[in-house]
Image (cartoon, grey):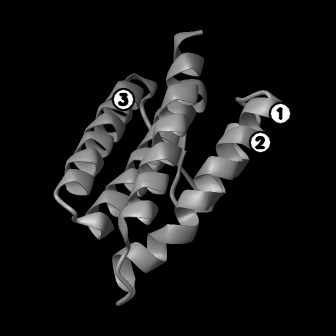
Amino acid sequence: MTRSVDQNKAKNYLIKAENALRIAKIALKETAYDTAVMNAVHSSINTLDALTTLYSGKRSSGQHTDVLNLIKGILTNDEFEYVKKQFSGLMGRKNESEYQPTLMNDKDAEDAIRRAERILDKIKAKLKT
């Protein structure tokens, strides 16, 4: 499922993505590992929403992984595979970090932040072209 979004709002998703990533890094320093992972996940979701909003005026409104169908036509195959790998790794932690009683650790948080940074860097470069 998708939802139409004003393409001029793409920058707002990017701001949300950058803010969530900044908070993830603060949470890591404060040993709030679950919060770090959650914010890294939401950073990546907003990053991809920025991309799809700018290029197609749409964002995914169903399962979070549905966004992969939207970005496939925007990114090159190599870019898509790279982002898909990073995003899939993050989505694998979403449920556990937000809804399960299992606690994330420092390695989980560091990995999530690294993946979110990779996605943000790749997409920001694409948004400038």
> Mark 2 — residue?
81
- Which residue is pictured at 52% across the width and 46% down the height? 115
For the point 80% across and 32% down, which residue is it?
A: 78
Q: Looking at the image, tell me whether mark 3 or mark 1 is earlier in sequence order.
A: 3
Amino acid type at circle 1 is: Asn
> What amino acid is found at the position of numbered circle 2 in the picture?
Glu
Q: Which residue is mark 1?
A: 77
* Mark 3, residue position: 9
Q: Work out which quarter of the rendered image holds the C terminus and state it.
A: top right
Q: Amino acid at mark 3?
A: Lys
Residue 38, percent from left and from top: 35, 62
> Which quadrant of the view contains residue 30?
bottom left
Query: In screen coordinates, is 32 left or right of 81?
Result: left
On screen, residue 14 above or below 97:
above
Residue 43 or 115: which is nearer the viewer?
A: 115
* 27 in relation to 97, above or below: above
